[in-house]
């Protein structure tokens, strides 16, 4: 992991004057085993020390204690180590109770959340473009939920700490959220 560590540190230090946030894809760190998970935490901590906002691209989602554990691991920092990300990506398909541990951290701790709404991969249409009986697509209903979930975390600026992951060619969905 030393080569990866050196590369990531050099990249972060080289971009610090022109980039405000980094999104770290946890899967590539996890693929390296426990050393990769440790490197993920170290990279988050180093990026934050340099002044970056850090988004953990983990796309987690589950219910109950498992959702709580994911929120703790990615937003609080595993084991209370203080290397939690500032925001993370989540999968909404467990509903509100599956997102509550993450949403609580947006309301109470100033963390951010990016909810998968409409992704850009070609087969996303199989699920996300399903026509609903009442009209519209499933992704539009999820977008409406994102707006609802974000109501409890609006700051003085009016912006919510809950945002959407939306592919670039989705049209007016972004305006609705």
Image (cartoon, rainbow, N blue to C red):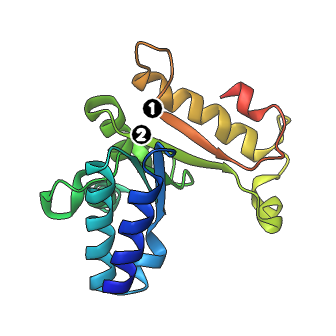
On screen, 45 above or below 134? below
Q: Nearer the viewer, residue 109 or 49?
A: 49
- Check whether the beta carbons of the residues at disc 2 and disc 1 lie within 8 A of each other: yes
Residue 122, given in percent of the width and then of the height, sits at 83, 66
Residue in the picture at 39% in, 80% down: 4
Direction from residue 172 to residue 73 in the image, left or right: left
The label number, if any, that marks residue 161 in the structure image: 1
Q: Which residue is mark 2?
A: 112
Residue in the picture at 31% in, 85% down: 2
- Residue 64 can be seen in this image: yes
Residue 90, given in percent of the width and then of the height, sits at 49, 53
Q: Nearer the viewer, residue 93 or 29?
A: 29
Q: Can you say which quadrant of the picture contains the C terminus?
A: top right
Residue 116, given in percent of the width and then of the height, sits at 61, 51
Direction from residue 23 to residue 71 in the image, left or right: left
- Residue 61 can be seen in this image: no
Residue 126, given in percent of the width and then of the height, sits at 81, 63
The total of numbered circles placed on residues is: 2
- Distance in Å between CA atoms under marks 2 and 1: 5 Å
Residue in the picture at 13% in, 57% down: 80
**Which element carries disc 2, helix, strand or loop?**
strand
Direction from residue 67 to residue 20 in the image, left or right: right
**Which element carries disc 1, helix, strand or loop?**
loop
Q: Nearer the viewer, residue 145 or 165?
A: 165
């Amino acid at each position: 992991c030393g080569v990866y560590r050196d590369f990531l540190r050099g990249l972060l230090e080289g971009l610090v004057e022109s980039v405000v946030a980094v999104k770290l894809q946890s899967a590539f760190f996890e693929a390296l085993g426990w050393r990769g998970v440790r490197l993920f935490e170290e990279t988050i901590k180093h990026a934050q020390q340099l002044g970056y906002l850090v988004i953990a691209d983990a796309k987690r989602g589950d219910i109950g204690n498992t959702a709580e554990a994911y929120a703790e691991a990615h937003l609080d920092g595993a084991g209370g180590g203080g290397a939690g990300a500032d925001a993370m990506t989540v999968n909404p398909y467990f509903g509100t109770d599956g997102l509550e541990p993450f949403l609580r951290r947006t309301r109470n701790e100033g963390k951010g959340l990016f909810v998968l709404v409409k992704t850009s991969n070609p087969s996303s249409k199989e699920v996300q473009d399903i026509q609903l009986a009442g009209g519209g697509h499933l992704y539009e209903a999820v977008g409406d939920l994102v707006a609802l979930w974000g109501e409890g975390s609006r700051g003085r600026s009016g912006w919510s700490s809950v945002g959407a992951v939306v592919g670039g060619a989705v049209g007016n969905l972004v305006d609705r959220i």
